[in-house]
Image (cartoon, helix red, strand yellow):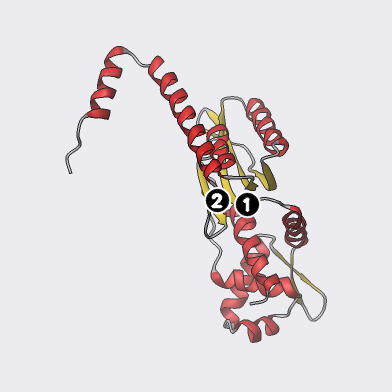
Amino acid sequence: MPASQIDFIKFWNTYYVAKIAFPIGGYPMVRFTEEQKRIASSLFASPKTVDELNRQLNIPFDKLNGQLKHMLKLGLVKVEGYPQKYALAEEVSKGLQRRKEIAEKDPFDLRIKAVIEFKAVEEAFLEKHMKDIGEKLKKNLNYTIYDIYKAKPRKVGDHYSSYFEVNLSARDFTSIVKFMYFFGPSSVEVIKPQKVVLAMDDLQDALGEMAEMIQSYNEAMLRSMAKDELEAFAKNLYSPKAD
């Protein structure tokens, strides 16, 4: 597969799948099929008719038309010209180009995708908090931000909820540890590299950060617990567990 098409598949998996299909807080989930990814990869190279897609991808016409119809509904492809040709939506093409430009200048190797969830009783407070967190992420020199997708707030019971789907690279492992602690993502996926080699000082700094953060959390938790809760906690923590 050409490198440009491989780049597109990575973009598709780390942007549009997350943007439309991430299963967070009751948001609808849609899974893209392998056929849809192959169609998108082909259209990344150039617009094509149904016949051209059929010949190149060897997908039966009935299945191919069904996949294209679904992609049209989601706004990921468009139809243009005569004879009719399918092409990627402008947002997809522009997004891929923007990511390539960022990647060319990105000095960091560690790349992750993460979801940060938000809840608040008032929608205005939720919006303000999300804006503040987004600005902090963008200003932090330890990260290169590829995308921050903000989900539309939804009312769930007596509160409002939303989430960020963040695609970023980090300076080092220590920066990822700080991201986990200070931004509190509910899920994280490593995009690259396949294999990580850590410098000793980076590992040492990361372990030091973890130790400090865990101690701070423990102290805050213990201060908030009643005496009987502390005793029960200590008993469960230090009692040997049966195999």
Instruction: Indicate the quadrant where residue 220 lies.
Output: top left
Residue 171 position (above or below residue 119): below
**At which x and y percent is residue 10?**
62, 63
Residue furthest left in the image: 242
- 44 or 155: nearer the viewer: 44
Q: Picture coordinates of residue 143 (x, y %)? A: 67, 43
For label 2, the residue is: 22
- Please name the residue shown 38% across and 18% down the image: 222
Q: Do labels 2 and 1 touch, CB within 8 Å?
A: yes
Query: x, y percentage for residue 31?
Result: 53, 60
Horizontal relation, residue 177 to residue 10: left or right: left
Question: Can you identify the residue that label 1 sits on?
Answer: 19
The residue at 62%/66% (across/down) is 70
Q: Is residue 107 above or below residue 88?
A: above
Toward the front, the furthest residue is: 200
Q: Which mark is residue 67?
A: none
Whether residue 24 is visible here, answered yes or no, is no
Point out the image quarter for the C terminus.
Answer: top left
Q: Secondary structure at mark 2?
A: loop
Q: Amino acid at mark 1?
A: Lys
Residue at 52% of width from left, 44% of height from top?
200
In the rendered image, residue 181, in percent from the top left (x then y), is placed at: 53, 34
| Amino acid type shown at disc 2 | Phe
Of 174 and 30, which appears nearest the observer? Answer: 174
Instruction: Specify whether 87 is left or right of 36.
Output: right
Seen from the viewer's position, the closer of residues 35 and 172 is: 172
